[in-house]
Structure formats: structure tokens, C-alpha cells
Image (tube, rainbow, N blue to C red):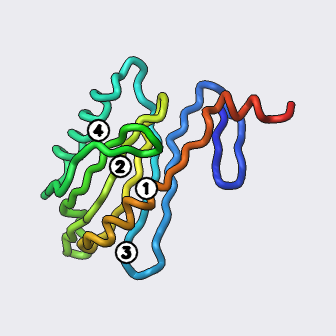
Amino acid sequence: MQFTFNEGHIQLPSQWQDQSMQVLVSTDNSGINLVITREAVPQGTLTPELYQETLALYQGKLDGYTEHACREITLAEAPAWLLDYSWNGPEDEGNQGRISQIAVFQRRGDTLLTFTFSTSLSLKNSQKTMLLEVIKSFTPLPPENDIQKDQPR
């Protein structure tokens, strides 16, 4: 398996699985961060089932969950799901804050790729629009087999 990251890529044994997480933080005092995760999709899982099961995890498990939007979108010319929601975050020094999040899920082969923006402040519509534009700028790499064909031996 080829694992690609900003600085390059490495070859891993085929039984390894990419469960990496990338965290990006805004420096503009908005408190917004972006977490990108990858999860292996169990063999035989149909895409509609995968999305419904993933959405149900969020909708049923978060304390004080409030859904603001849940819809299918297009990301990199393929279907994806957008979930805009808020929930009661973990208690910190006796204060339980509200967390606002926008998550976009997309199946890419045998991987569920998730982009999640989070902040402890309410997101304004202009911020939501900007964050969605960031996600829509996603450009997938060519499939691993195509990359290997291009590499000198």
C-alpha cells in the first residue's frame, strides 16, 4: 500500500491500513480547525448504507445534538454527504460548551474520507460558505495503481 503525505510517500505492507488524521488550525482567532480522517470501508458495504450508518453515528450519539443541514453534495465530481450540526462538547473546568461542526463524508474506493470543521463558537453563514469552498477545493490524487505506473523503477 502506498501512503502519501505532504512530504512524499512510503510503501507499506498490504495488510496495513490508513487510519491517519490530519489537523489544520486557523490562526485568525475564529477557533476553527479542520480534521481530515480516513477509515477503511468493510468489504461488501454498499455506499448508500455506508453514508446512512455514518450519519446515524453522529445523529444518535452526541449529547444535545442539533442538526442544521444534512444533504448530498458533489465533491470532486462524485457524491458526498454534508452534515452541519452542533452538540454539547465535553465539560471543561465546569463549563460545557457548544461545539459547531460541519462534516463532509465521501467514499473513495475502500476508504471513507471525512473532512470535519469544528469550533466552539457559532458559525456565521459567511464562515460556513467559506469552509464549504475549502472542502470543495479537494482534488483527489490519481488511484494508487496509476501513481505506481508513473514511478521510475
Question: Which residue is depicted at the point 59% across and 25% down?
Answer: 15
Q: Which residue is mark 1?
A: 135
Tell me whether circle 1 and circle 2 mark residues in contact (CB < 8 Å).
yes
**Of the residues under marks 1 and 3, which one precedes in the sequence?**
3
SS for dot 4? helix
Tell me whether circle 2 and circle 3 mark residues in contact (CB < 8 Å).
no
**Of the residues under marks 1 and 2, which one precedes in the sequence?**
2
Horizontally, residue 80 falls left or right of residue 18, namely left
SS for dot 3? loop
Q: From the viewer's perspective, is the residue at label 1 or at label 4 nearer?
A: 1
Tell me whether circle 1 and circle 3 mark residues in contact (CB < 8 Å).
no
**Of the residues under marks 2 and 3, which one precedes in the sequence?**
3
**Of the residues under marks 4 and 3, which one precedes in the sequence?**
3
Question: Which residue is depicted at the point 36% across and 22% down?
Answer: 45
Neighbourhood count class around disc 3 (C-alpha, 10 Å): few under 14, some 14–19, many 20 upward: few
Spatial CA distance of label 1 from label 3 is: 18 Å
Q: Which label belongs to residue 104?
A: 2
Q: From the viewer's perspective, is the residue at label 1 or at label 3 nearer?
A: 1
Q: Mark 2 is on which residue type?
A: Val
Q: Split into 4 quadrants, where in the image is the N terminus?
A: top right
Spatial CA distance of label 1 from label 4 is: 18 Å
- Tell me where residue 30 appears, x and y as whole percent: 37, 77
Question: Which residue is depicted at the point 20% across and 74% down?
Answer: 95
- Tell me where residue 126 appears, x and y as whole percent: 30, 72
Q: Mark 3 is on which residue type?
A: Gly
Spatial CA distance of label 4 from label 2 is: 11 Å
Furthest toward the bottom, the residue is 29
- Decide which of 89, 33 is in the foreground and name it: 33
Q: Split into 4 quadrants, where in the image is the C terminus?
A: top right
Looking at the image, residue 75 lies above or below residue 28: above
Spatial CA distance of label 1 from label 2 is: 8 Å
Q: Which label belongs to residue 31?
A: 3
